[in-house]
Amino acid sequence: MGQGRGWEGAVLRLMRAKDFRLTVTDAEDVTPRYRRLRLSDGGLLAATGVHPTMWVRLWFDNAGRPHQRAYTLVDPDPATGTFGMEFALHEGCASDWARAAKPGDTVEATVQGTGFQRPDPAPSHLFAVADPASLPALNSLLDALDTVPATVWFEGATAGLPLRADPARHEIRTVPRHDGGARLVAEVREALPALLRDTPEPYVWIACDTATTRALSTHVRKDLGVPRQRVNALGYWRAT
């Protein structure tokens, strides 16, 4: 594995990335635009271990050219060597593969660059900004910080999606996507300053499209003065 992946594959090999072949064991349409697969890991979990928000790069064929996208592991089980993956479906070769995937299909995966550092000191409140693409990672984070209250801005509707929110601890604020994420940015910018004033140990986690993530992370760090080590921001997709 790892051949024919162009410059991205070459760089990952130089960085000692590990390659594995995953096999689909089950497929389920959660909603018409959200699909869940279960996969056997080809030895991945035993070789790498498990941590919250863990993700891998999957490789797809895009009109004869290699294309990689990162996906979060859902409920990884090292004892059985299995995990789930959830796909917010849209146009593109990764979604096309997920729509058609059936038991017995395989896909190559590369592990490199993933990591999670538990906030220290522990957060007194989590502020998260997410959308369907980052929902599996959000769920993993909420599981990992299971006693921490959270305010979550979620871009898009949550109906039918497997959002692991506990009404006793988690406030979910849904925001329709308008103007390329501008409405989400405006709502977070309006509400967050007052919330931060009442939070001694905040932790801010932002995982939306690249432009929205960049705008919000810059605002939180530079304008609101949240220390860099208390902010985790990663663009999960690129708007076109």
Image: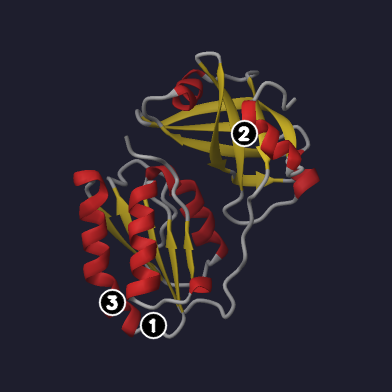
Image: 13 above or below 168:
above
User: What is the three-letter code of the residue carrying label 2?
Assistant: Glu
Q: Are marks 2 and 1 in contact (CB under 8 Å)?
A: no
Scheme of image coloration: secondary structure
Neighbour tally class for label 1: few under 14, some 14-19, many 20 plus, Cα within 10 Å: few
Q: Nearer the viewer, mark 3 or mark 2?
A: 2
| Quadrant of residue 21 within the rendered picture | top right
Looking at the rendered image, the quarter that the N terminus falls into is top right
The secondary structure type at the circle numbered 1 is loop
Neighbour tally class for label 2: few under 14, some 14-19, many 20 plus, Cα within 10 Å: few
| Quadrant of residue 65 within the rendered picture | top right
Label 3 to label 1, Cα distance in Å? Answer: 10 Å
Q: Earlier in the sequence, mark 3 or mark 1?
A: 3
Q: Are marks 3 and 2 in contact (CB under 8 Å)?
A: no
User: What is the three-letter code of the residue carrying label 3?
Assistant: Pro
Rendered image: mark on residue 8 = 2
Q: Are marks 3 and 1 in contact (CB under 8 Å)?
A: no
Label 2 to label 1, Cα distance in Å? Answer: 41 Å
Residue depicted at 54% across the width and 54% down the height: 140
Rendered image: mark on residue 111 = none
Q: Residue 119 appears at what percent x and percent y?
A: 57, 72
- What residue did someone put label 3 on? 193
Rendered image: mark on residue 199 = 1
Image: 86 above or below 201:
above
The secondary structure type at the circle numbered 3 is helix
The secondary structure type at the circle numbered 2 is helix
> In this view of the protein, which residue sits in the foreground, 171 or 47?
47
Asked whether the viewer can see residue 3, the reply is: yes
Image: 91 above or below 117:
above
119 horizontally vs 187: left or right: right
